[in-house]
Amino acid sequence: MTEHERKIAITRQQLAHIGEGAVAYMREMDAEDLQGKFPGMPDLTPGTRLWALFAANGQPILLADARDAALAGAFQNDLETVSLH
């Protein structure tokens, strides 16, 4: 390590809070995958695909039938979005 480099230690708990309240991720998902992420969600027709918006810590925020609607939800909550593929 050079004099200009230094190591930063971060705990799992600290890592889990990075981006909290500022960053959210979007992901297009099948109805079957959504059941585990959104408890209490009604049964959907198999093969239905929806856009899900999650907080940086993985907490579900909203579901939308279109990508633009999920982006609008993020915008309304002042969240910067990233997509997962």
Image: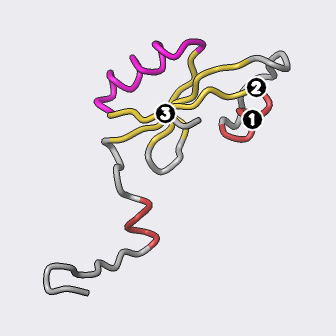
Crowdedness near tag 1: few (<14), some (14–19) or many (≥20) residues, C-alpha within 10 Å: few
Going by the numbered disc 2, the residue's amino acid type is Ala
Which residue is disc 1 drawn over? 33
Q: Main secondary structure of the magenta part?
A: helix
The residue range painted magenta reads 65-79
**In whole angstroms, how far apart are the C-alphas of marks 2 and 1?**
6 Å
- The image's mark for residue 83 is 3
Label 2, secondary structure: give it: helix
- Between 59 and 66, the one lying in front of the other is 66
Asked if residue 10 is positioned above or below residue 16 in the image, the reply reads below
The local secondary structure at tag 1 comes to helix
Q: Earlier in the sequence, mark 1 or mark 3?
A: 1
Q: Position of residue 60 (x, y in %)?
A: 55, 37
* Mark drawn on residue 31: 2
Residue beneath the point at 70% across and 19% down: 49
Q: State the image coordinates of residue 22 (x, y, percent, origin top left).
A: 31, 41
The question of residue 67 being in magenta is answered with yes
For image coordinates 28% across by 30% down, the residue present is 78
> Vertically, is 49 above or below 85?
above
- Magenta stretch: includes residue 75: yes
| Quadrant of the frame with the N terminus | bottom left
Q: Amino acid at mark 1?
A: Asp
* Residue that sits furthest to the left in the current view: 3
Label 1 – label 3 distance at C-alpha: 17 Å
> Can you tell which mark lies on residue 48?
none
Local packing at callout 3 (Cα closer than 10 Å; few below 14, some 14-19, many 20+) is: few
The residue that appears at 53% across and 44% down in the rendered structure is 59
Mark nearest the camera among 1 and 3 is 3
Crowd band around label 2 with a 10 angstrom C-alpha radius: few (<14), some (14–19), many (20+): some
The type of residue carrying mark 3 is Ser
Q: Earlier in the sequence, mark 3 or mark 2?
A: 2
